[in-house]
Image (cartoon, rainbow, N blue to C red):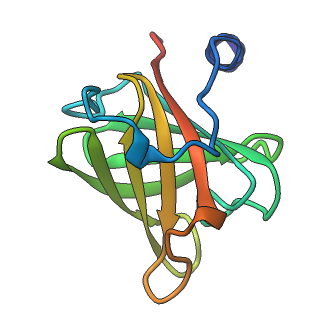
Amino acid sequence: MKYAAHLTAVVAAALLAGIPSAQADPGDVPRVCTVPTELANGTVLILYGSTPAVPAAPIGDSMTLVRFPAPGALQYMVVGSGVWQDGTYTYSSPEQGVAVIDSTQTSAPQPIPFTMTLRCRTNDTGQYAYTTPGGTQATDDNVTVYRITHVNR
């Protein structure tokens, strides 16, 4: 419970710090920002948008928290659901300011593959696109914003 309260406080502080507008064109900003070199224990990715951010997210405004408890493992929760979903991931940075998280939700009866692509605007914030193989593709309709923060347990 103490961890949940701390995580809630971190999320609130991160949101009050300001997340860039999802309406901005990422092509207008030169890539002088960076994405993390790894997603270590304590890293939390806060996702907000008007379209799904992860397989369990509803259509419509939603917030999702993604945490990385161990190398190659992630957990996410759509805020309000109270349920953490488990998954695996690989992480890469194919170019300056871009990170790709290839994931599979493993807590579903049938594993669900999905990809999260981060394009930074600052070292902690930017735009995020969610895609699924043969399904949702990155368009202006499914781009959300993210903030990366760290929680000490």
- Depth order, front residue of 88/58: 58
Q: Residue furthest front?
A: 28
Relative to 7, say whether 128 is above or below. below
Q: Residue furthest bottom?
A: 134
The image position of residue 105, as x and y in percent, is 49, 65
Relative to 149, say whether 110 is above or below. below
| Screen quadrant of the N terminus | top right
Residue at horizontal 71 percent and vertical 13 percent from the top: 16
Decide if residue 31 is on the left or right side of residue 51: left
The image position of residue 59, as x and y in percent, is 79, 64
The image position of residue 132, as x and y in percent, is 48, 76
Decide if residue 108 is on the left or right side of residue 103: right
The image position of residue 75, as x and y in percent, is 50, 45
- Depth order, front residue of 91/15: 15
Residue at horizontal 38 percent and vertical 36 percent from the top: 29
Q: Quadrant of residue 97?
A: top left
Relative to 9, say whether 142 is above or below. below
Residue at horizontal 48 percent and vertical 15 percent from the top: 151
Residue at horizontal 61 percent and vertical 16 percent from the top: 14
Q: How many marks?
A: 0
Relative to 67, say whether 19 is above or below. above
Decide if residue 40 is on the left or right side of residue 14: left
